[in-house]
Every structure is written in C-alpha cells, then in structure tokens.
Image (cartoon, rainbow, N blue to C red):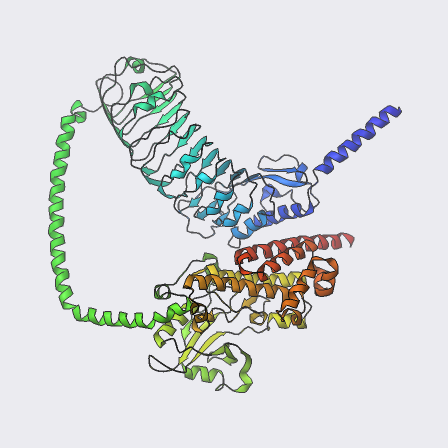
Amino acid sequence: MGKYALVLLLCFAWTFLFAGGYQLQASQAQVLLQLRKHLEYPKQLESWTDHRVDFCTLSFVPQVNVTCQENVVTELRIEGDAQGKVDEFIGFAIPNRTLSESFSLDSFITTLTRLNNLRVLSLVSLGIWGPLPDKIHRLYSLEYLDLSSNYIFGSIPPKISSMVKLQTLKLDDNFFNGTMPNWFDSLSSLTELSLKNNKIKDSFPSSILSIGALTELDMSGNEISGELPDLSRLHGLSVLDLSWNKIDSPLPPLPKALTVVLLGKNSFQGEIPQQYGQLRQLQQLDVSYNALTGIPPATIFSLPNISHLNLSSNKLSGSLPIHLRCGNMLQFVDISNNMLTGGLPSCLGIESDKRTLKVDGNCLSVNVGKQHAKSYCDTDHMHQHQEQSRGKNAGVVMGLLLGILLSVLLLSLGFVLCRRCWSRGISEQHLLQKSVQDSSAAGFSSELLTSARFVSQAAKLGIQGLPLCRSFTLEEINEATSNFHESTIIGDGSYGKLYKGRLENGTQVAIRSLLVSKKFSIRNLKLRLDMLGKLRHPNLVCLLGHCIDGDGQEFNDINVFLVSEYVPNGSFRRHLTEKALNWSERLAILISVAKAVHFLHTGVIPGFFDNRLNINNILIDEHNVAKLSDYGLSIISEEPAKSLAKGEGPQAWQMMNLKDDVYSFGFILLEALVAPSVSARKDPSILKEMMSLNSQEGRRRIIDPTILATCSQESLSTIFPLMNRCISPEMSRPSMEDVLWNLQYANQVQDSRDGDQRYSSASQQ
C-alpha cells in the first residue's frame, strides 16, 4: 500500500511541475488581455476573461491557439469571422467590416511587440485596418507571419527586411498599395512568400531571385507589370502563382522543381518555351488569357506528372502533332479560344470519363465543340486583317498630326498675346525667389517652403473640426488685449511676452508677441507663418492665426503676433509642484508630448526641429490632455543661423536640432521624476545624481515619493535608461520614435500593475 501511495505522490508532483512549467508570466497574460481589448472583444476570445486564465492550457478552439514555452507565448493564432472583402478601401473604418474608428494599428502592434518571444503569429480575418507600422520588426524572433484577409494598406514596411528568421510571410487579401519591395534577398530563410490579392504596382522584384530557400511564391491578383526575369535560379521553387497581373514579357525559363505554375490572366507574349517540356515534376500549368503564339510544345502534354493543362484564350496557331502522346496523369486539357487547325491528336480524341477536354473556339477539322471556319485561323487572313488595321491606324495618325499642328499654331498665337502677362509673372516669381533666399538660413529651401506637404494621416484624423489659421489685423489684436494692458500679460519668455485675450466672438486666446529677425522680408515671413499655421495635431496648441505689424518689403523692427487657443489649466510644471500627480498621470502627459514632437519631426516635410522643449511649454487643457506650445518658432527666429555660420549645411542643422529636441525631452523626463529645482540645474552635478538612480537607495533619495508609491518598478525601470540616452552625447541618443515606443511600453506595464491592483481590491470586498 505504501508503494502505491508513493507512486501517486510522484505522479501528483510530476503533474504539478509539468503544469507549473507552462504557467504564463503575469505580464504576458496582461498583454493577451490588452490584445483582446484592441481587437474589440471578438467572440473567439470570450474565454480570455482575466489574468487568472491559464492561456497555455485552454481547451482547443479551432480559431484560436496559444502555445507557450518556458512561461512565455511563442505562438499566437487568431482567426476571425470578418465578412467578405470590399472592392475598394480608402483607409477609413467600415461598419460591420473593419474594427471601429478608434482602433489604432500602431498601438496594437506596440502592444503585440511585448510578446518578443513569438515565433508564430497569425491574425486572419479580424477586421484589422490601417498602415502596417515599421515597429513590426521588433518581433525579431518571428518565423511565421500571417496577416491575411484584413484591411491593411500602404507600403509593406521596409524594416521587415531585418526579420531574418522569417520562413513564412503571408499578407494576402489586404490593400497594400505601394511599390513592390526589393529587399527580399535579406530574408534568406524565407520558404513561403504570399502577397496575393493586394494593390501592389511595380515590376517583379529581382531580389526574390536571391532567396535560395524559397519553395512557394504567390503574387497573384496585383498590378505587377513589365518583364518577368529568368526564374530558373530558384532551384527549390515548387509553387509559382503570378496570375491576374499585367506582365507583358515573353514567358521566362522556370526551375525544374516546380509542381504548380499559374501565369494566366496576364499579357505574356511569344511562344511557350520548349524548356517547359522538361519540367518533369510539373502537375499543373495554366497560361490562359495571354497573347501567346505559335504551336505549343508537344512535350508538355506528355510530362509524367502533368494533370491540369490550360492553354486557353491565347493566339496559339498551327496543328498539334497527330501522334502527340499524353501523360498518364493528364485529367484536364483546355486549348479553347485559340487559332489551332487540323485534327486532334489521337490521345486527346479518345473519349474518357477520366479526362476533361475543351477545344471550342478554334478552327479544328473535327466535330467537337463549336469551331470557326478555317479561314478565320489562316495566317493570310490574319495578315490581311492586320493590313486593314494598319490602314485605319494610318488615317487616325494623320488626323492626330493635323490636330496637333493646329494646336501648335493656336498656342503660338496665345504666346504672343500673353507675353506681357508672362513677363509680369516672371517678375513676380523673381520677387518670390528673392524673398526666400534667406530661408536657407533656417535650414529650409525655398522649394520646401513653397511646397510643404503633410504626411501624417493619423494627425489628420485627430484634429477634425479645428479652425484654419487666418490673418488678424492689428486692430483685432489691440481689441483682444485691451491695447496690451499689463493685466493681460500671463507670461514673458525668451520668445517674447504672452498675453491673454478675447476675440470679438468671445473666444479666449493666447497671443505671443515676437520681435522678428531683420533677415526676413515680409513675403518670406508670411511664407514661414503660413507653413507654421498648417500644423495640426491633437497634442499641439492650435495656432489660430497671426498678425504682422509692419509695412513695406524690408524693415528694421517688426512685431509678429501669434494667436493660439487658450489652454486654461496651466503648465506641466505647475501641476508637478501644486498637485500630487501619480505615475500613470505623468506617463500620459509624457506620451502626449512625445507624440507631438514625433509629429513635428516626421509628420510634415520639411520637419520642424529645435522646438526649445521645456516643461513650461507643456500645457494641460480642461480635459487633462497635454498640449505642446511655442513649437516651431525657430523658423522665424535668428537662432538657426548660428549653426550655419560654422559651415554646416541645412541637413546637418536639422539633424543636430532633432537631437537637441531629444536632449531637451530627456530633461523633461528628469523633471517628471524629481523636483523641478533639481532638474533645472542642467549642470555636471545633476548628471552625477542621475547615476544614483541605478540603485534603490538613490531612487528613494531623488525620486518624487508620489511616484514611488504609485509606480510599477518595471515601468519605472524602463524610463531610467531612456532618460540617460536622451541626455547622453548626441551620437547615442534615441529617435523620438524610440522615445515614444519606450514610453508606451512603460505605460502598458503600469496599466497591467494598476489592473492587478483593482482586481485584488475588488476581490477583497
């Protein structure tokens, strides 16, 4: 009896150890719950109720699979039941088709990248929409990636090329509409590449020819055009599908390992290569609906493994050999709608229940299907038809030439009549060039100033309803500020005094008075202010307009007034000193500011750099949303000229000041962690104190006690190295994208901790 008890005890212990070995880390479980929230609680994930669920041992569900190894998720597969695709998608949420308007693919991927041990990721038919962000490459362990049947648009992110462990990449049935990437040679381990049914327009990427491991290639249903290169270098390729494209070259040589070749619905020309008769592994060949000519090689009918052969709807002509031999596996042959003549080969004429034969639309001398008269397929008849077409085309060309000649005469007459107007226009253009010559002093060319464009779709979606920037008169400014009465002054900084005013319609505004450099003409200054006025982002204080107090094209002293929305709840510094902000509240503000700066750097071309970031310029509105003020003013100040005086070019200036913004943001991080009086010093002693943050004792001594009482240690530990990198020498500083990613990661970790605390409190009640 004792032996049986011992055996039972050992079994129990083994079961406990085995189950415990797959107990998921709490942070990983929280990520899965956040993903469920991002995906708007699909019914497939209804068993993911809270962090107590053992995700690794859930009963099998056909549409969901989570595989764990050593307490982390290594495989995640979720297949939704999204309804059928639409033909056109313009980048906005579609009810009952996509996830809602509030869904952010960028935030979703940010959360997903916390599962950094993932080797398999499949998210199919979930209504995911938006451009795929570059940060997907942070899933560096991925071997299998499938995002098919969603609503992802834009270009395929170039940084996917760094995911060198990828073996399968499937992005089928989306709306990718950029050019075809040419970096596939970086994915040397890739065995399956499938991009079918997208909107990709480009030629076939030559970099694919360097993927020696590739076995399956599917790019059907796109708009690939141009020439298809020699594919025989892909020795391991077994499946090739390029159907439903616009390729208009001759058929290329193919690798001998192919079993399936689908090249139909293109514009291939010339004859079917004799080399295709040597593809002894080939089971299916479809070259239908092209412009192929000549007699098809007899050997393709007798390939030992061929079962499906479709040569229909081409311009194949001549007679098939009467003694042509058919392979034993051949079950389907379609040679319809060509210009074939003569009789059918004996092996095709034999009636059989095992073989389907389609021959309609030829000129065959057999009583099978509907055939044209022989004259329809005669070469002489074809040439006669072509000659008639040429005659008609010549008449059309002659008519076009006469029309063009008449148009040239009319244009010449118009040129003579409008010469004076052109001369006036040239003078105006010369004036514009003169007025923007000094723009290079701020790192912006005249071309960029006059054709600035914005590239952030996310920002556009977030600022709908904000007023456009307009010009104000000096009378309006005087009236709004009661003639600049001292009682309306609310600030006085390096850029000038700040007034609180009220417009005629009752709107409260903030008005910044600036003394502008002598280097700028009125015309050039207006260009710069108009450019600044186009900036719109949810985390930027909205510029409502401007007023230039000066006459003439040149000036010595001139005031510029910038009219912005009034943000009533004070600055971030005031909130830090007067209110006990917890760690989550501080992170939310920091993330908002990082989004604003990232937009200024990358959301507009050219970018706005050297924004003199400081904690006083971060304002909090009535909804507790943080907004950055006094941004972009360097383009109308004298400061940019300093760097160029040292012989540096505009690009070097932009890069230096981009890093300056990161440097300044590092001190904002520091001030959010410690007392403002400490961070304001910016001297060597504060850098020494920062080193003590690596120890628990140093943190207790320097960090705000409110933070220590409300933070997750993992979240806080993410910020320390980030802050050090921001304030470090320029070459090692992060980009604002990296800063934003780290802040969002710290926030998600903090959310997990706050969620656990709320659940614990609720369970104790």
Q: Position of residue 166 (x, y in %)?
A: 52, 38
**Left or right, 318 with reference to 587:** left
Q: Residue, x 30% and y 27% (percent of image)? A: 312
Q: Position of residue 252 (x, y in %)?
A: 32, 30
Q: Residue, x 65% and y 48% (percent of image)? A: 30
Q: Residue, x 17% and y 22% (percent of image)? A: 374
Residue 155 in view of the camera: yes
Q: Is residue 26 above or below residue 241?
A: below
Picture quadrant of residue 54? top right
Q: Quadrant of the N terminus?
A: top right
Q: Is residue 345 above or below residue 240?
A: above
Picture quadrant of residue 487? bottom right
Q: Position of residue 551 (x, y in %)?
A: 35, 82
Instruction: Say which of 522 and 110 sits in front.
Output: 522
**Left or right, 56 with reference to 608:** right
Q: Is residue 754 above or below residue 689?
A: above
Q: Position of residue 322 (x, y in %)?
A: 25, 14
